[in-house]
Image (cartoon, rainbow, N blue to C red):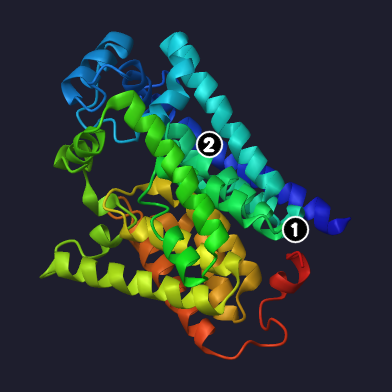
Amino acid sequence: MKDRLAAGVLSLLALSLMLSYMWLRRDWWIEGGNDFAAFYSGAHLLGSGDLYDVAALHANEDRFLGDHAITHGYVRAPFHAALLWPLTRLPYLTAFYAFLAASVAAFVAFIALWPSPKLEARLPFCLMAIPVFDCFVTGQDTVFLLPVAAGALALFRREKPGAAGALLSLGAMKPHLFALIPVVLLARRDWRALRGFLAGGAGLAVVSFALEGWDWPQRMVRTALDPAFSPNPHLMPNFTALFLGAPGAEYWQVAATVAVAVGCWYVARRQSWEQAAACALLGGVLIGRHSYLADCTLWLPAAMTLLCRSRTAVMRFGALALLVPPTYFLGGAGRPTAEAAALAGLLILGQAWEASTAPAAEPEGLPLAAKTCSA
């Protein structure tokens, strides 16, 4: 009873902090002047052949909002625009609040579905997850990948790997964040899950080609590589920010990307599916060319998994640090997320080290893991 009361108080405090964060940035979301504008405007272009035409997108944003952001470009596959198309039947602001309500519902579904730690422990962590609330503020869609991850884990636990793999194919909404999931499936030789993943991806590809023709991947990549679409690289929680300004930065990024992929392969071969997936979700944000604070949403399930599954106190304290807001602002206003990226990279290294050692009989060190994590 005392634990539940403490969890309730912490949850209320965490939610109050996050709502305060949203209120301080209310100019981003009260009128819907955020990244949702690109989604809504892009969905209006679906099937026109202009889905990846930046000028056409900006013209739509001007029509719906009276202004446009030069950093906006539509960089999702056509199936994503098809999923959003029903919202185009609504006025812009109504559509945005419907999207925001769906985002909150997806977050609630994740909280309900994710298995560990126990609800009274995971609720405060979820309600202080600043990347999730940044999704709400900026109109980003990464939060919809949380129930995808939770649902896939539930299907794996029910021994339905094919269905789990098919569900994971929805990561194609933001493929760079799920880029290491196929590495995990291959390393674990989970052929049924891999077949489901490929079948789901093929279905999404067929829909996309049917809607936008054969050249949409080329057009989407061209838009994604436009430097205007990825401003302020020093604010990215990835290797771009970590090696920014270093001599030979591009080579360091490539080397670090390869190291992360190898680390995920090694972890997948020697640890549980949950731990391998945690490694993949941590690494997906790091290796992506275009990642921002909202994309760190996927570090929430990864960090909670490591909090419960890691064998050493150092790893569990590192996971705990990734779950609390101050970690994302250690560098101050200039570099608010590079330090979080460094911590995520260290956690991947720690996972690889733990995978190389003999498993301990019981977790040691942090009492929180033993008291709050589900079996």
**What residue sits 26% from the left and 52% below the top?**
289
Q: Position of residue 293 (x, y in %)?
A: 39, 48
Using the image as rendered, state which of residue 241 and residue 169 is in the foreground.
169
Identify which amino acid the numbered label 2 is placed on: Ser
User: Residue lying farthest right?
Assistant: 1
Per the image, the residue denoted by label 1 is 118
Q: Quadrant of residue 157?
A: bottom right
Q: Secondary structure at mark 1?
A: loop
Cα–Cα span, label 1 and label 2: 26 Å
**What residue sits 47% from the left and 57% below the top?**
326
Which of disc 2 and disc 1 is earlier in sequence?
2
**Depicted 260 relative to depicted 173: above or below:** below
Q: Position of residue 68 (x, y in %)?
A: 24, 21
Q: Secondary structure at mark 2?
A: helix
Question: In the rendered view, does 227 fall on the left or right side of 368?
Answer: left
Question: How many residues crowd around disc 2 within 10 Å: few (fewer than 14), some, or many (20 or more)?
Answer: few
Using the image as rendered, state which of residue 170 and residue 61 is in the foreground.
170
Query: Is residue 324 shown to the viewer in this render?
Result: no
State the quadrant of the C terminus: bottom right
State the quadrant of the N terminus: bottom right
Per the image, the residue denoted by label 2 is 20
